[in-house]
Image (spheres, helix red, strand yellow):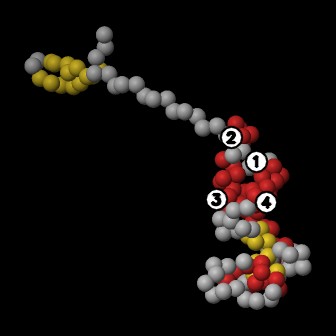
Amino acid sequence: MEVSYLSAGKQLPSNNELIPLTLCYDNSRKIRVGGRLKNSILPELQKHPILLSKSNHAVNLIITNYQLKLLRDGPQLLQAALGEKFWSFSVRDAVRKVLRRCIPRFRNHPRFTKQIMGYLPEFEPLLYSNELVLTSPAHS
């Protein structure tokens, strides 16, 4: 829907969630995010990152490609690297979804099981001169 509006040079409807991003449509038919960085010295791709949809197979492929480039590091580094060139509302969820399916990462970062603790020993009171002085574990 956004592509048809932007390619025709029209404004998005007022109830669209993408209005605050000031979207623009470039010559290579990609939707880019505008903003206040127009006059900065950053590269064009960082000034106006490409907008990624919420659920798309291409988004999963891009995340997987970045994951392999970064040698399967953590999700925050992957999100930061993606944020330099791409913009998405749900990038965190998409990264987590891809990382959960990554078998080599799962094998390199296993979750260890915790050993269940045993039962505590029974306590028997030691009696000295008909008084309860202290308690200690029963040794047999």
Q: Above or below — where is 33 with respect to 131?
A: below
* First-in-chain label (2 vs 1): 1
**Relative to 129, is 4 on the left or the right?**
right
Q: CA distance from mark 3 to mark 1?
A: 17 Å
Amino acid tagged 2: Phe
Q: Which residue was labeled with disc 2?
A: 106
**Residues at badges 2 and 1 in contact (C-beta under 8 Å)?**
no
Which image quadrant is residue 127 in?
Answer: top left
* First-in-chain label (4 vs 1): 4
**Residues at badges 3 and 2 in contact (C-beta under 8 Å)?**
no
Q: Which residue was labeled with disc 3?
A: 93
Which label belongs to residue 89?
none
Q: CA distance from mark 4 to mark 3?
A: 15 Å
Q: Which residue was labeled with disc 1?
A: 72
Which of pointers 4 and 2 indicates the residue nearer the eye? 4
Which of pointers 4 and 3 indicates the residue nearer the eye? 4
SS at mark 3 in the image: helix
Which label belongs to residue 58?
4
Amino acid tagged 3: Asp
Which image quadrant is residue 39 in?
Answer: bottom right
Which of pointers 3 and 2 indicates the residue nearer the eye? 3
